[in-house]
Amino acid sequence: MIKACLFDLDGVIVDTAKYHYIAWKELAAELGFEFTEKDNERLKGVSRMASLDILLSIGGITKTEKEKDLLAQRKNERYVSLISQMEADEILPGAKEFLTACRKTGIATALGSASKNAMIILERLKLNDLFDVIIDGTHTTKAKPDPEVFLLGAAALRVEPEHCVVFEDAEAGIEAALAAGMKCVGIGSSEVLGKANLVIAGLHQMSLEKLKDLQ
Ligand code: G6P
Ligand code: MG
């Protein structure tokens, strides 16, 4: 029986990949190389510092830990300035509706995001009230594919992992959900998210009936 749904934020609830992309692209340009949209795909679900390492490897650049901290800080300042202007139409189709439907039928909801900026987005778009529990990058010590973020969410909801379903758009997130012993719905293409129990294009394609079928 499904008792709780846990949601990734970026790419599942809101379309923020485009803002990460702008901020990383600008940083790469400052460092003297091009960062493409295809490169950006590699950063989905990847923590900020690990993303920076990938970016630097694309540019063939080596930096000290101290320099990397400053670069990550600069990228984040730009990203925060962009998400601080987000509007309600950037909430992905069906997200609010599905979260609301879950809560109406007594299914608990949690956020399980790697982002340390999750609260800025939730507050700006007034989404906080749709989640019973919010776990983000400020609560975790291990990045996806480690299951920590989802296990913390399930524990806070007091629901056993086998009664939880995770919604994720990144391969590392799917692996984290499965490692937590939870069911997983992939948001995106089945080519990338093939390990998920079900793959849909977005939460607008999700329903309580499909949730029941996952048991
Ligand atoms: C999500 C995004 C990643 C991002 C990570 C950390 O997983 O998909 O692209 O790097 O969060 O986000 P932050 O807002 O803390 O830099
Ligand atoms: Mg994501």
Image (tube, rainbow, N blue to C red):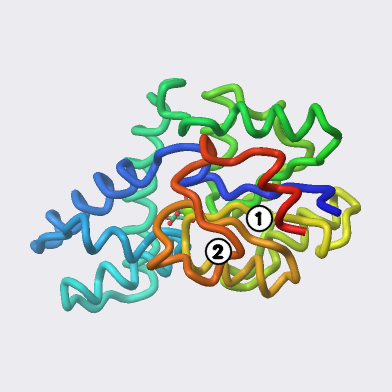
Closer mark to the observer between disc 2 and disc 1: 1
Q: Which residue is mark 1?
A: 166
**Residue 123 image-quadrant placement:** top right
Q: Quadrant of the C terminus?
A: bottom right
Closest to the observer, 137 or 146: 146
Q: Secondary structure at mark 1?
A: strand
Q: Is residue 104 above or below residue 131?
A: above
Three-letter amino acid code of the residue under disc 1: Val
Q: Residue at the spot x=51%, y=69% of the render? A: 172
Closest to the observer, 173 or 28: 173
**Residue 176 image-quadrant placement:** bottom right
Label 1: how many Cα within 10 Å (few below 14, some 14–19, many 20+): many
Horizontal and vertical percent position of residue 193: 47, 65
Q: Residue at the spot x=40%, y=39% of the render? A: 15
Q: Is residue 182 above or below residue 8?
A: below
Q: Is residue 147 above or below residue 5?
A: below
Left or right: 136 as drawn, with respect to 115: right
Label 2: how many Cα within 10 Å (few below 14, some 14–19, many 20+): many
Which of the labelled discs sits on residue 174, or is there none?
Answer: none
Q: Is mark 2 within 8 Å of ligand 2?
A: yes
Q: Earlier in the sequence, mark 2 or mark 1?
A: 1
Alpha-carbon span between mark 2 and mark 1: 9 Å
Which of the labelled discs sits on residue 173, or is there none?
Answer: 2
Q: Residue at the spot x=27%, y=47% of the render? A: 23
Horizontal and vertical percent position of residue 22: 24, 44
Three-letter amino acid code of the residue under disc 2: Gly
Q: Quadrant of the N terminus?
A: bottom right
**Residue 206 image-quadrant placement:** top right
Contact between marks 2 and 1 (CB within 8 A): the answer is: yes
Horizontal and vertical percent position of residue 52: 34, 65
Left or right: 74 as drawn, with respect to 215: left
Count up the numbered dots. 2
